[in-house]
Image (cartoon, rainbow, N blue to C red):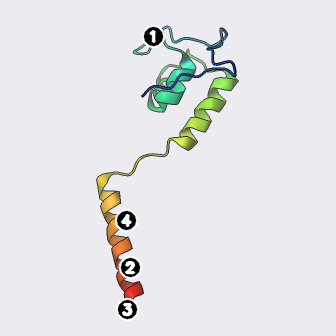
Amino acid sequence: MWLNVKNSKGMLDKKDRIFKFGKYKGCYIKDIIINDTQYITWTMKNISWFWYSKEEVELYKKQLKLNKKPKNQYELIMESIKREKENEQGLH
């Protein structure tokens, strides 16, 4: 599900910038920051001529904090095993 960045009136700001290149050509930069931080990170590392505004960078930093990397299956299994062991120890 894609989220769109809107102002307090529920509208996209006219000042919002749009990507003019790449797979998100024509999309609002803020929307991509919210929905695909990996792409933003890639552009920061690989496209030296492109810059982000201070506001966009701040939004990106907030999104990185919100988008903690999901745990993979191995991590979930290991946590489950750890909880089971803790529960067993608590019962004895």
Badges 4 and 2: C-beta atoms under 8 Å apart?
Answer: no
Residue 14, x across and y down, in percent: 65, 8
First in sequence: mark 4 or mark 3? 4
Pointer 1 residue: 25
Pointer 4 residue: 79
> Within 10 angstroms of label 3, few (less than 14), some, or many (20 or more) residues?
few
In terms of secondary structure, where does tag 2 sit? helix
Q: In which quarter of the image is the C terminus?
A: bottom left
In terms of secondary structure, where does tag 1 sit? loop
Distance Cα–Cα, label 3 vs label 2: 9 Å
First in sequence: mark 3 or mark 1? 1
Q: Can residue 44 be seen in this view?
A: no
Pointer 3 residue: 92
First in sequence: mark 1 or mark 4? 1
The residue at 34%/59% (across/down) is 76
Q: Which label sits in the foreground, 4 or 2?
A: 2
Q: Which label sits in the foreground, 1 or 4?
A: 4
First in sequence: mark 4 or mark 2? 4
- Which circle marks residue 38 in the picture? none
First in sequence: mark 3 or mark 2? 2
Pointer 2 residue: 87
Which of the two residues, 32 or 43, is positioned nearer the viewer here?
32
In terms of secondary structure, where does tag 3 sit? loop
Q: Which label sits in the foreground, 3 or 1?
A: 3
The residue at 55%/42% (across/down) is 66
